[in-house]
């Protein structure tokens, strides 16, 4: 749907086709007030998803606010990759770890489509974890995803158990480029965007730490930004812990997901 259709179907509580089949409908005072306010906020550059308080990802509904990154269509490629590898590893180890869960869209989607998984999802932001918990409840997977407040791996016990998959969509925008991003993106939490001077800071930390939490032959799946393939591959190679096994492109033919195997 277009942004206008999303706004009006949300305000009127109707389906898209009703907008065109019931053209004589009059807005109530509260509906008109909401649409007027929403349009003003949108003109200021605020993302429509924050205005509506929700968005769709993997065909599921997710609540969003300014404490979490808005789920992107490209990240569905990351989830699809995780589903493929999880299916092959599930007979041996059903545990999946997500680093930096934000709205919880990745972990919750995995739990929804692969109910046999046991998923742990971490985030440094307590406010983001509250959103993720709400979304797990909304999508009926609260009992299948464990959320933990943690700066990457810091609050996890490496000797408790290991995971078959570690998945992450880390901050990967260069610090100096954030102020030049589109106004909509600048409304999102900076800590979910800022990947350090070269955009690769979190990849270094995640690649270094994840080998202690993955089983032998375990899989590390990461979303990457434009022109970051070479840099991330170099970090993986230098770690001496991982071998790249797949690069997945998005629909614009941009390298978007990198998959590596431990050991």
Image (cartoon, grey):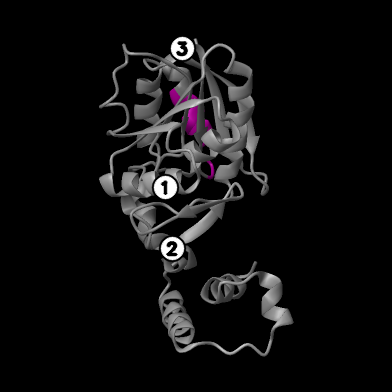
Name the spot of residue 230 as percent of width and height, x first: 52, 32
Magenta stretch bounds? 226-235
Residue annotated with mark 3: 215
Name the spot of residue 46 as percent of width and height, x first: 42, 69
Nearer to us of marks 3 and 2 is 2
Q: Distance between the residues labelled 3 and 2?
A: 38 Å
Name the spot of residue 110 as percent of width and height, x first: 54, 34
Q: How far apart are marks 1 and 3 (CA)?
A: 27 Å
187 in the magenta segment:
no
13 and 184: which is toward the camera = 13
Residue annotated with mark 2: 53
Work out which quarter of the rendered image holds the N terminus and state it.
Answer: bottom right
Q: Within 10 angstroms of label 1, few (less than 14), some, or many (20 or more) residues? A: many
Q: Which residue appears at 32% of the width and 31% of the height?
A: 152
Q: Which residue appears at 36% of the width and 15% of the height?
A: 212
Of helix, strand and loop, which one carries label 3? Answer: strand
Of helix, strand and loop, which one carries label 2? Answer: loop
75 and 15: which is toward the camera = 15
Taking the view exactly as shown, the residue that stands out farthest to the right is: 21
Q: In the displayed structure, would residue 65 be above or below residue 38?
A: above
Residue annotated with mark 1: 103
- Residue 88: which numbered mark, if any? none
Q: Within 10 angstroms of label 3, few (less than 14), some, or many (20 or more) residues? A: some
Q: Which residue appears at 39% of the width and 54% of the height?
A: 177
Nearer to us of marks 1 and 3 is 1
Q: Within 10 angstroms of label 2, few (less than 14), some, or many (20 or more) residues? A: few
Q: Earlier in the sequence, mark 2 or mark 1?
A: 2
């Amino acid at each position: 749907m277009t942004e206008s259709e999303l706004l009006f179907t949300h305000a009127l509580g109707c389906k898209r086709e009703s907008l065109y089949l019931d053209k004589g409908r009059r807005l109530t005072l509260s509906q008109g007030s909401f649409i007027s306010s929403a349009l003003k906020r949108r003109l200021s550059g605020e993302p429509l998803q924050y205005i509506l308080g929700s968005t769709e990802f993997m065909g599921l509904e997710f609540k969003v606010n300014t404490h979490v990154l808005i789920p992107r269509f490209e990240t569905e490629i990351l989830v699809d990759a995780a589903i493929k590898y999880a299916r092959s590893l599930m007979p041996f180890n059903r545990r999946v770890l997500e680093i930096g869960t934000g709205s919880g869209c990745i972990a919750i989607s995995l739990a929804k489509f692969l109910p046999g998984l046991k998923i742990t999802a971490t985030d440094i932001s307590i406010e983001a974890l509250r959103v993720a918990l709400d979304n797990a409840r909304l999508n009926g997977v609260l009992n299948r995803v464990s959320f933990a407040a943690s700066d990457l791996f810091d609050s996890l016990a490496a000797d408790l158990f290991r995971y078959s998959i570690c998945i992450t969509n880390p901050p990967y925008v260069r610090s100096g480029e954030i102020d030049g991003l589109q106004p909509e993106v600048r409304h999102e939490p900076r800590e979910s965007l800022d990947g350090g001077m070269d955009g690769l800071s979190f990849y270094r930390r995640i690649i270094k730490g994840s080998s202690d939490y993955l089983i032998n032959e375990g899989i590390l799946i990461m979303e990457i930004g434009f022109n970051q393939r070479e840099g991330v591959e170099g970090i993986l190679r230098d770690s001496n812990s991982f071998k790249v096994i797949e690069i997945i492109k998005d629909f614009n033919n941009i390298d978007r997901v990198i998959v590596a195997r431990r050991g």
